[in-house]
């Protein structure tokens, strides 16, 4: 019996063909959300990198999330941002240092605690968030145009649910303060 091959995305299949993947070749991956989340993540990361090229926000992850959180919660700490940026403490410290070196955020000592450093967005950081807002406003149609508005809303709702569950309990452990950065709790 001849093995079928996974059709290349540039083949004759139409853009509305949702089943580009041959289940017999993917084995258990055909039903694994992780496989499809990773595939989409790689494509969306390329899309964002293309649009952020030449800015201090290109190259790597977590910078945009950090900027938005610092803007919405002036005085937030790097430790409070880290779970949302997907970084451990050393990686988060390097990311914050790069954002400071680029002039996008400032770090100031907490007047109530010598050990805590508070983060604040700069005017340059605000300007870069305007660029990100523009990119994200186009993302819906440029990167996810294959989805109807209803499908897009449903996908976002489901991914928020999954991401929230992982944020609160990575490796089965509740992250201290997870969610507090956005809820004020």
Image (tube, rainbow, N blue to C red):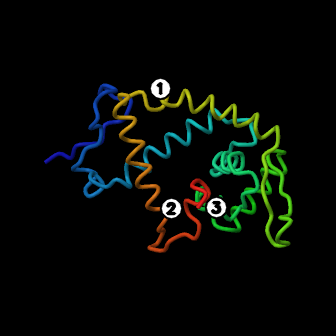
Q: Label 1: state its secondary structure.
A: helix
Horizontal side, residue 110 vs residue 51: left or right: right
Q: Which-is-in-front pick, marks 2 and 1?
A: 2
Q: Label 2 near label 3: C-beta < 8 Å?
A: no
Q: Residue at x 46, y 55 (%)?
A: 163
Q: Give the x, y percent position of residue 172.
A: 44, 73
Residue extending farthest to the left is 1
Q: Give the x, y percent position of residue 22.
A: 25, 44
The first of marks 3 and 2 along the sequence is: 3
Label ID, residue 82: 3
Mark 1, Cα crowd under 10 Å, few <14 / some 14-19 / many 20+, is few
Quarter location, residue 84: bottom right
Q: Residue at x 35, y 28 (%)?
A: 148
Q: Give the x, y percent position of residue 145.
A: 42, 27
Q: Which residue is mark 2?
A: 167
Label ID, residue 141: 1
Q: Label 2: state its secondary structure.
A: helix
Depth order, front residue of 155/178 = 178
């Amino acid at each position: 019996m001849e093995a079928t091959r996974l059709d290349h995305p540039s083949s004759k299949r139409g853009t509305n063909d949702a089943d580009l993947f041959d289940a017999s070749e993917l084995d258990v991956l055909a039903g694994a959300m992780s496989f499809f989340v990773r595939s989409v993540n790689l494509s969306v990361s390329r899309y964002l990198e293309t649009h952020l090229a030449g800015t201090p926000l290109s190259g790597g992850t977590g910078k945009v999330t950090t900027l938005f959180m610092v803007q919405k919660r002036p005085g937030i700490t790097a430790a409070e941002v880290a779970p949302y940026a997907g970084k451990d403490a050393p990686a988060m410290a390097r990311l914050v240092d790069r954002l400071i070196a680029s002039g996008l955020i400032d770090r100031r000592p907490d007047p109530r605690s010598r050990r805590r450093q508070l983060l604040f967005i700069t005017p340059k950081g605000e300007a870069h968030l305007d660029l990100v807002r523009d990119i994200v406003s186009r993302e819906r149609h440029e990167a996810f145009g294959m989805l109807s508005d209803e499908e897009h809303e449903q996908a976002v709702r489901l991914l928020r649910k999954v991401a929230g569950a992982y944020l609160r309990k990575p490796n089965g452990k509740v992250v201290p303060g997870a969610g507090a950065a956005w809820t004020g709790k």
